[in-house]
Amino acid sequence: MLTLTTASLFGSSENTAGRQPQFASSGKRLFMAYGEGNRAVVKTSDDGGQSWAETAAFTAKGKMMLGMRRGPRIAAMRDKAVVSFISEGDLWAVNGGAPVRVNDVADSAREGLHAMAAGGGKIYAAWLDLRSKGTTMAGAVSADGGSTWSKNEVLYTSPDGTICQCCHPTIAVDAAGKASVMFRNAIAGNRDMYAMEWGGPAAKLGNGTWKLNACPMDGGGMAFDSVGKLVTVWRRDTQVFVARPGDDEELVGAGKQPVVACTAKGVWVAWNEGKGVMLRDPAKRVEKMGEGTFPSIVARAGGGVLLAWESEGQISMKVVGG
């Protein structure tokens, strides 16, 4: 059995209203962002996720996109956080002041799917971009904590004219500040996962392929392990896999919407199987955490992980291991 502790967002309550939770960490401090109506809410925890304090809430000027992995993202730099969200077709980032538009062509982020992460004094953002025919992967970088952003660059264009049109991208940044991006491609009728270092070539992940004339709306997750190696998790058809770039894939189990976190003990994977939120620990023991969808996971400085998910407009959390 895994060691479980229910984490509280508001004193005695396990749940709080909200959708699409996302985590970031900086040292012992944990950050969480989620959507609540038209607001991006930010909370912080200094005790490994046992208790939380609301530190900010940002209201989108237009309708904030929310649901199916659309929603706020959060990146941590030292003791502060930057939040991003997509509203009225544009990607916005805010670090306590006025929101700043990240995409430099208006309405080009209207699909509503993006990623953001920080490391090495920089913040990286990537999103599904529609400024030209077909969907491309675009990105921008901030070197001043999210106050200003670089000129947008096209990180990847599919030779078939479009990447997968509605699977969210993922960014992970290593200890040296080097960013990697993962996304679902669309080549020759196959919807396979690809990873790339920022500005470098993209390479397919895993051994198999998924012939699919549709978008599964499932982008997976990735993280760097304790020795600096990239670990990715993603769905192919009805199964979830773990893969490191250039290595064979490993079957985790049946399901969808996987995410990953790495601790000194190894790799943790969470995903949906049916209506259940499943968790596999580094010893490859699997346990159901609860009922819900769209899990999010983060490593805790004291060991173990913090897991959150949404269920019928509520967010539930559990501290696992340690």
Image (tube, grey):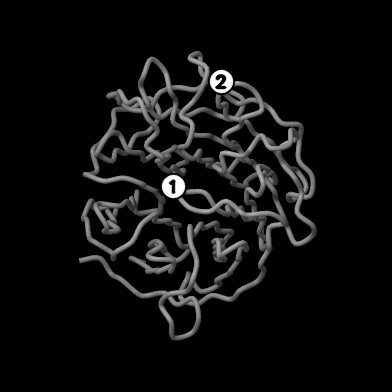
First reached walking from the N terminus: tag 2 or tag 1: 2
Say which residue appears at 59% left-offset and 59% top-offset: 26
Q: Quadrant of residue 135?
A: top right
Residue labelled with disc 2? 157
Q: Is residue 255 left or right of residue 133?
A: left
Q: Is residue 71 above or below residue 225?
A: below
Identity of the amino acid at label 1? Ser
Q: Position of residue 274 (x, y in %)?
A: 24, 53
Q: Position of residue 138 (x, y in %)?
A: 62, 31
Q: Position of residue 4 (x, y in %)?
A: 30, 71
- Left or right: where 153 falls relative to 291: right
- The three-letter amino acid code for the residue at tag 2 is Thr
The residue wearing badge 1 is 226
Q: Quadrant of residue 191?
A: top left
Residue shown at the point (28%, 66%) measured from the top left: 290
Dot 2: what SS? loop
Nearest the viewer among 76 and 127 is: 127
Q: Residues within 10 Å of mark 1 (few under 14, many from 20)?
A: few
Horizontally, residue 215 falls left or right of residue 182, namely: left
Q: In whole angstroms, how far apart are the C-alphas of marks 2 and 1? A: 32 Å
Q: Of 40 and 250, which appears nearest the observer?
A: 40
